[in-house]
Structures are given as C-alpha cells and as structure tokens.
Image: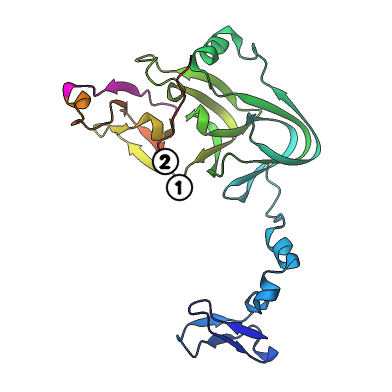
Amino acid sequence: MMYECGQCGFKKDIPDKYEGKKIRCPQCKATVRMSSETHHSSNRYSLAEFVKRTTEKENGRGLFQLETEHLLEVNLDGMVWTKAGSMVAYTGEVTFTREGVLEHGVGSLLKKAVSGEGAKLTKAEGQGVLYLADSGKKISILELQDESIYVNGNDLLGFTGDVRWEIKMMRKVAGMLAGGLFNLKLEGKGMVAITTHHDPLTLVVAPGKPVVTDPNATVAWSGRLAPELRTDVSMKTFLGRGSGESLQMSFRGDGFVVIQPYEEVYLQAG
C-alpha cells in the first residue's frame, strides 16, 4: 500500500496492516488515517473510483433534496414548477409544459411583457426523479409553513405545486431596472428552492433598523416586508464622485432580507 501525504506529497510503501490506522508523515509530521482513498494515485483516480465518488447518493427520499450544493434532486410524484431551462436530467415518466400565457391572468402576462425576462416557468408533471441546476449557482431549500416570501425571478429555481404564486412589480421607478424589479410572491405550504452566487447572507430587518440593499444583489425577502426603491442620483454621481449605487432597495419593518455577494446584471426590456 502506498502512503502519500496530503500536506507535503511525501510517498512511501507501507504494509497493508496499517489500513485504517493513523500514520504520521516522517517529513512534515502531518497525521492521516490510512484508508482505501489514501492508496496510490492510480487507484484514487481510476474510472471505477470516479464513478463511486460521483454516483448519486441515497440521502433519503424527500420531495426536494440537495444531491450536491449546486444540484437539486426532485423526487417527483405529481407536479412542480421549475425555472425554464433548469432541468439537467431526469428519470421516469416526466412531461414538461411551458407556463401558459394566461395561466395567471392578463395582469401577469402584461408584467412579463414589460419585464422581458420576467420569471419564466416550466411545469414538470409525472413520476420520476428530476435534477435541476442553474449556472452552477448554490442552492438553498426553504419549507413554507403558511408563510410567504418574495424571490427575485432570476434566483428562483423551483417550487412545489401546492405553493401559491404571483408575479409582483415594484411600483416606483419601474423602468429603471427591468429584470430586478419583477419578483414572485410565494405563499402557503410547500417547498421552494432558491439559488445564489456563492453563500447567501440573511440580514434581519427590525423596527428602527432598516436595511438598504443593491437590487442586483438582493435575492429574497420575507413576505410581510414592502421594500421601497430609492435613487441616489446627484451631480456627484454623474461626475463619478458618488457612491455609484444609484438605485437602492430600502426595507423597513420586521422581517429579513437575503442577499448574495454578487451583482447580477439584468437586460433592459425592449
């Protein structure tokens, strides 16, 4: 059996009797427990080892579960809504239908027409296992229990069919940031999957302690909050001496806001 130190790379042949025992590297003094994964690299990087390492893990059979932090497994027995284009694979008998133009009424259709990207959804129905992902973004699963949450349309990966949803458009400065001003309000009981670039951060909003965010970095917020858009456009901004954040979302009240360490760029409609 080949011992290979993960710290300094020192290699040495050792007897198989050390399997499962801790070995101290004679060169850098790091300690590692010997196992089949610490064998010679020809075994560690073999095709069989790759398949074993990356094969689907059976971590329970919940409706929504994370296969990896970037891949959502949906154990489908009925219907779920998914972000259009997010399906990467499936097994079983599953059919996909794009959201009907009047599925949520004329008002929703008009909002989509104005917003351009406007949170396009696909309905997945049947029985099987569905795998969803979105550009390698990190996935978080939320379970609503008679609660409501707003999610930026671009950051919504999917939700179960029992969750009620409605497209919402912020009233003020509606033409300044097309994609970021259109969100989905999700409420009731069910599962919701959202995505973020890197790890999300949740900020608590409390009376007297408002939170101001960049719309492009804002992912979601609690349903009882009603954010206001405000602008910070001044002569200094135009001269390049302002904050550079000319459009902001202001949250006041009691709730939370989810942000990501990344500013998504939305295409202007038109």
What range of the chain is rendered magenta? Answer: 222-235
Quadrant assignment, res 132 = top right
* Residue to which mark 2 is pinned: 260
Nearer the observer, 246 or 240: 240
Which of the image's four quarters has the N terminus? bottom right
Residue drawn where x is 48% and y is 80% of the image = 8
Figure check: 241 above or below 268: below
Residue drawn where x is 49% and y is 91% of the image = 26
Mark 1 residue type: Asp
Q: Position of 128 compared to 157: left or right?
A: right
Q: Position of residue 266 (x, y in %)?
A: 45, 27
* Residue to which mark 1 is pinned: 199
Quadrant assignment, res 48 = bottom right
Number of on-image labels: 2
Instruction: Tell me if residue 37 is in the magenta stretch.
Output: no
Mark 1, other Cα within 10 Å: few <14 / some 14–19 / many ≥20 = some
Q: Position of residue 7 (x, y in %)?
A: 48, 77
Asked whether the residues under the numbered discs 1 and 2 touch, taking CB atoms below 8 Å apart as contact, a structural biologist would say yes
Figure check: 217 above or below 198: above
Mark 2 residue type: Gln
Nearer the observer, 174 or 236: 236
Residue drawn where x is 43% and y is 22% of the image = 181
Mark 2, other Cα within 10 Å: few <14 / some 14–19 / many ≥20 = many
Q: Position of 214 compared to 232: left or right?
A: right
Q: Position of residue 143 (x, y in %)?
A: 56, 38
Element at label 2 = loop
Nearer the observer, 119 or 7: 7
Element at label 1 = loop
Residue drawn where x is 50% and y is 24% of the image = 185
The tag on residue 93 is none
